[in-house]
Image (cartoon, helix red, strand yellow):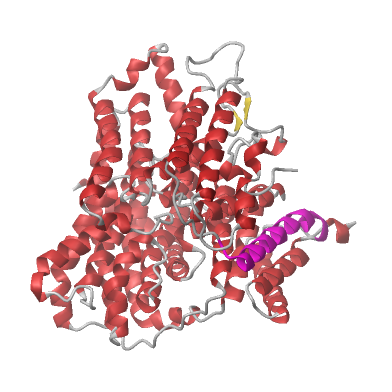
Amino acid sequence: MTEPPGDAVTTPTGTGPASTDDGDASRAAGAGPSGSGADRLVGGALLVGGIATGLEATTFDVAFLTDPVGPKALPLFVAVTLALAGASMLARPREGVGLPPRSAAIRMAGAAGAFLIYAAVLPWIGFYLATTLVVAALAVLYRGPAKGGLAAGLVLTTVLWLLFVILLALPLPVGELWTR
Amino acid sequence: MDALSGLLSGFSIALQPINVGLALGGVGVGTFVGMLPGIGPINAIAILIPVIFAAGMPPESALILLVGIYYGSQYGNSISTILLNVPGTASAVVTAIDGHAMTRDGRSGPALAISAIASFVGGTLSIFGLVLFAPLLAAWAIRFGPAEYFALMIFAFSALSSFAGGSLVRALASTGFGLWLATVGLDPNSAIPRYTFGQLQLLDGMDFVVVTIGLFAVSEVFQLLEETDRGQEAAAAIGRVAVSTKELALTGWTMLRGSVLGFLVGVLPGAGGTIASFLAYSTEERMAGRSGRFGQGDIRGVAAPESANNAAANGALIPLLTLGVPGSGTTAVLLGALLGLGVTPGPLLLEEQPDLFWGLAASMYVGNAFLLLLNLPLVGVFVKALQVPRWILIPSVAALAFVAVYAVNGSAFDLVLMTAFGAVGYLMRIFGFPLAPVVLGLVLGPLMEKNLRRAMALSGGEWGVLFDSPIAITLWAMAAASLLVPTLLRRWTRELVETTPEEGL
């Protein structure tokens, strides 16, 4: 459906397979502060991403130009900026980037997973059920009690329903599962 | 004279019941979100934008509400800074020094009171500056052509990158990333798709609400997960929230100087509240000399940065409204909101939509008065909100963000994008890339490209046109100076560099 989260930061182009994993890899492997390796990875990814951005920009050809600059100029400028920044980071990487401890990284991945599942099931099971569940899941990740999280989800969903549907007359998706 | 009659007509708009209500609601929400972890002004504004669009609010009312949140949050942020020593934004770091020292001495009441009063002084004086200078700047900027606008935007980017705190290289990379995001989608001139990866949903480009909420709010949700292992700090009990006349007399000039300094710094792009509060604090510290107890709970150490950062916040509205060029992440989001409401800020705004400008200025007086009147008695109530457990607060913020993002296009794909940007934003935070330049690049990128192409079309492809007028050359020189001067300054003063990475001023 789309690229994995974390892709866009390191490789704005998303075309370089080598750099696609950088963000996630450094996060998963990360336990405590690291040396300059992680920073070098990001710098390298920026460099590769910048080059890929530039290469892609050269394909933006139009049959006849409506203006002398065309659609290439800004992307090329961006590409050079990103590549130079990446090269500079490679040359002088920063020590001791504060990567999260393993337990926190696992919970972050859990939260990201919950958000993606939320996006996937929202049209299907509807806003009310999905939101209650995602709030409960997040509450647990934040070390709250499961029952309390569920209660918070129910209260919040009710408040949002009052606010959006009743007060502002903005429909929220009810879910195909129930309307069919 | 002009300003006076303009303001009078503005009050006839600002005092309409709905707009008084919105100003009150704005500063109330602003105080609240400024105080809590995880939201902050930029998210509160971004989350409200789809709601405002959907509610079909008229532009002047929408702006009154959004700007109320904007300056209200400056004050809310000081509450948690003073009580808990957790500055939510870089501009509050200075307040924390003496503010929290006063709390440790059991003087949190006076600290909160002087912060409210200084915010009020800084806020109201700078609105004065706003109504005086905005028309002048607008009259001058009317001569700007596309080449001048292009140079001005380059200046905005270089200034924000340079002052964002931390590494210039990383800030420039953030700006580049934001500009890259701006190019995603169909090119408006030639209608060819750029960087859409064959995704139909990306043809319309990246929505700044989705990107902003992802980068700031969702990444904060991730970041705070890391902190749950530490306990939640309890707020100290507050005494009576009031200052003595002696303290007021002591801080009077401090607040005046802070306001003027803050306003002047705020007008410049990029610098904003952080630099303003640092400068105001160090000026007062030097002027007080030996008589001061700066660093150990001197009340002037709270008054100076508080008046300065509120004045700076209002000063930053001048380039936004009269030039259409914001200088910070939060004002960039405001620009996005204005464009979405069909308002194009720029030198013609005052002439074409005077109600919008003067109504806003007048409502800021109303809002600042509310802030002062409400916060002195009600701060105790607000502080109760700091006791809500994180496991309720943060998931609630996340759910609000989801609804807002979904409301933009009614598409679940935007929720996926938001999550991706959340991960990106988190990684950017830990690797020291500032987030505000991304938003500025995304919102300003299309305007910059449009002006570049227009200038080049007028000149028939002659690049020299970009450096053809004295105004353009001045702006290019300022852009270059903004990149070079701070780097040189850093060599001399280590102090300014020690700012925490800013979070959308």
Position of residue A30 measured from the top left corner of the image (x, y, whole percent): 59, 58
- Residue B153: quarter of image: top left
Asked if one can make out residue A158 in the rendered structure from this viewpoint, the answer is no
Residue extent of the magenta highlight: A100-125
Q: Nearer the viewer, residue A130 or A171?
A: A130
Q: Nearer the viewer, residue B82 or B260?
A: B82
Could you tell me which residue is drawn at 47 percent across and 50 percent down? B435
Q: Is residue B28 left or right of residue B110?
A: right
B44 lies above or below B143:
below
B125 lies above or below B441:
below
Q: Is residue A22 left or right of residue A73?
A: right
Position of residue A95 measured from the top left corner of the image (x, y, whole percent): 45, 53
Q: Main secondary structure of the magenta part?
A: helix
Asked if one can make out residue B177 in the rendered structure from this viewpoint, the answer is yes
Query: In the rendered structure, does residue B94 fall within the stretch colored magenta?
Result: no
Query: In the rendered structure, does residue A114 fall within the stretch colored magenta?
Result: yes
Could you tell me which residue is drawn at 20 percent across and 50 percent down? B492
Q: Nearer the viewer, residue B268 or B293?
A: B293
Could you tell me which residue is drawn at 60 percent across and 35 percent down? A13
B174 lies above or below B405:
above
Q: Is residue B216 left or right of residue B448?
A: right
Outermost residue to the right: A180
- Residue B158: quarter of image: top left
Q: How many marks?
A: 0
Q: Is residue B303 left or right of residue B384?
A: left
Position of residue B16 measured from the top left corner of the image (x, y, whole percent): 41, 61
Position of residue B483 measured from the top left corner of the image (x, y, whole percent): 30, 39
Image quadrant for the C terminus of chain B? bottom left
B140 lies above or below B95:
above
Q: Nearer the viewer, residue A55 or B328?
A: A55
